[in-house]
Image (cartoon, grey):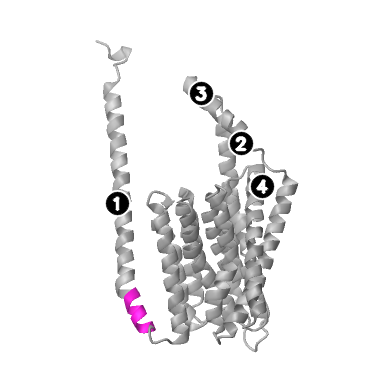
Amino acid sequence: MELLDVARVVGGLVVLVVGGELLVSGASALARRMGMSTLIVGMTIVAVATSAPELAVSVDAVLTGQPELALGNVVGSNTANALLVVGLAAVVGPLAVQRRLLKLDVPFMVFLGVLLLVLSLDGHLSPLDGLILIGCFLAHLAVTVVLGRRESRAAKTQAAAPAAGEADSEAAAEAAMEAEAQEPPMATGPALLRLVIGIGGLILGANVLVTGAVGIAAAFGVSGLVIGLTIVAIGTSLPEIVSSIVAVRRGEPELVLGNVIGSNIANIGLVLGIPTLLPSPLDGPAGMPVPAAVVALDAPLMIVAMLALAPVAFTGYVIARWEGLCFVALYGAYLAYVVLAAADHDALEGFTLVMVWFVAPLLLVIVVGLVAYEAGLRQARRELTRERDRRATADEPPGPSQTP
């Protein structure tokens, strides 16, 4: 391990922070200019942009004959996005969850993870498998853009509708005053410039940081898969971490989950799909070999991590701070397991027993209890609303035709 590697890690972090600030501000300004919601921009522009480091690392790994690093990068990065990125952002500030994420995007993200696992069961990702993954990503991207434009048009139509009645006039006046109080959106040119510089900063910072981190890890003799699952995964997820924390601090929490879910979909669809189409420098069939450890453990854990977003987000459509802390703790436990397994440490067996027979059942009971409690609250609200409507109907005076 050299001091140069440490300097690369520190310098990469600084560049990532600056790039994340520029990326979020530019993307938010473009969203306002284009009339698109921040969620849609997060799931398209920001998600693909923050997946650029993973793509660069995966392509380079495949071309240099290290496909295990590429797979570990994607699987580890998606796990880090679902647990670490969302967890840290929720600790900074609670994350509001839009219902369309739970209805469309989270299920599709989990579906894509399951599809990756199924395609990997034969121990190989062929070019055809890569084309299937790319096609799924493009289909989701097209649906997201179409629905985003439709929602934007509906919002504009509703806002432009003439007010009816005094209450509507007062609401329209208040909305107009709020619109006037808001800062005018940044011009398109400066917003695009910030977006491009931010993307460049994220890519440069991630590459510099990963280079230093790999040098440090290689000094300890760690395998390529473990490096990909841990240091490289966290390093290439730093753009998501930085941009998500910046988004929460800037009052754009919708950008966080859109960024994470869109980035996970892009990682599986593009970051794994494109490298399978590249010629292999090693003697063997085209595509990418899949280690047995990925199929047996790492990919299923990635799916579980992504699936965990659904019930947590379902409870009140908010990811609270304590839930974020739980996510961060779970990711720490996952990293500990990977490192202990790689080192074949004596504590691995005891750690595994504690996680399997105590922590996992406890978390399952907590999640089931929260979902059941939230479902009961919603049922009670619906019954209360129906009771109020029934009483209001019963208290209405009879019409002229009903007068005796």
The answer to the question of whether label 3 and label 2 lie on touching residues, with beta carbons closer than 8 A, is no
Res. 317 in view: yes
Who comes first in sequence, dot 3 or dot 2? 3
Numbered tag placed on residue 30 in the rendering:
4
Tag 4: residue type?
A: Leu
Residue kind at label 1, given as amino acid type: Tyr
Most extreme residue toward the left is: 404
x%, y% of residue 358? 30, 72
Which residue appears at 36% of the width and 79% of the height? 351
The answer for how far apart the CA atoms under marks 1 and 2 are is 38 Å
Q: Specify whether 317 is left or right of 380.
A: right
State the residue lying farthest toward the front: 3
Return the disc, 4 or 1, that comes first in the chain's sequence. 4
Which residue carries the number 1 mark? 373
Which quadrant of the figure contains the C terminus? top left
Q: Distance between the residues labelled 4 and 1?
A: 40 Å
Residue on which disc 2 sits: 182
Residue 252 is tagged as none
Give the distance between the C-alpha atoms of the residues marked 3 and 4, in whole angstroms.
Answer: 30 Å
Above or below, 182 relative to 259: above
State which region is magenta: 348-355
Q: Where is residue 114 in the image (x, y as percent from the top left)?
A: 47, 69
Magenta stretch: helix, strand or loop mostly: helix
Q: Nearer the viewer, residue 81 or 145?
A: 81
Q: Counting residues from the N terminus, which is met first, the one under dot 2 or under dot 4?
A: 4
| Residue reaching furthest to the top | 404
Q: Residue at x 51, y 77 (%)?
A: 120
Q: Which amino acid does label 2 sit on?
A: Gln
Left or right, 328 with reference to 280: left
User: Which amino acid, mark 3?
Assistant: Glu
Residue 228 lies in the magenta-colored region: no
